[in-house]
Amino acid sequence: MFRFGWLLVAGVAISGYGGAKNGNDPVFIALGSDFTAFRDWPKTALGDAPIQGHPAGPRFAYRKELPGPTEYPVGAIIVKTVERDTTPQSWDIFAMTKRGGGFNPRGALNW
């Protein structure tokens, strides 16, 4: 089983688009099943230089959806991995979803 980071734990609950939270704003809440095929998504190398407070090793981002002209759409999912070897079970994995509906107003709004 993959070792999932705190962002995945915080962002994963139930799947699908829910009702509007703020007027007609869509809301997305992800399930673990929304992340199962992340290794098939477009992959971008993020480097391997040490970053204080982050796990050491080569980092990659997998994006389920690319951003629109100004931002990611609601429902977008980004998975960041630290891949010290080729065995996915040993990777550190972190993820976040664009939830929408005004989620996280004091932080990364809608993420």
Image (spheres, rainbow, N blue to C red):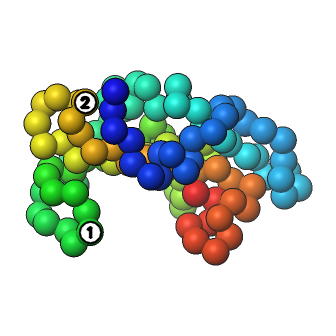
- Position in image of residue 68 (x %, y %): 53, 51
User: Quadrant of the image for the C terminus?
Assistant: bottom right
SS for callout 2 = helix
Q: Amino acid at mark 1?
A: Gly
Spatial separation of the CA atoms under disc 2 and disc 1: 21 Å
Q: Which residue is mark 1?
A: 53
Say which residue appears at 63% left-offset and 39% top-offset.
Answer: 13
Q: Is 44 placed above or below 49 here?
A: above
Crowd band around label 1 with a 10 angstrom C-alpha radius: few (<14), some (14–19), many (20+): few
Q: Amino acid at mark 2?
A: Gln
Circle number at residue 89 = 2
The answer to whether residue 67 is visible is: no
Q: Where does the N terminus fall, quadrant-wise?
A: top left
Q: Earlier in the sequence, mark 2 or mark 1?
A: 1
- Callout count: 2
Say whether marks 2 and 1 touch (CB < 8 Å).
no
* Circle 2 residues within 10 Å: few <14, some 14–19, many ≥20: few
Helix, strand or loop at label 1? It is loop
11 with respect to 23 (left or right): left
Q: Residue at x 57, y 41 (%)?
A: 12
Side of 76 relative to 103 (left or right): left
**Is 95 above or below relative to 23?**
above
What is the quadrant of residue 64 in the picture?
A: top left
Of 100 and 82, the residue lying toward us? 82
Query: Which image quadrant for residue 54?
Result: bottom left
User: Is 35 on the left-hand or right-hand side of 18?
Assistant: left
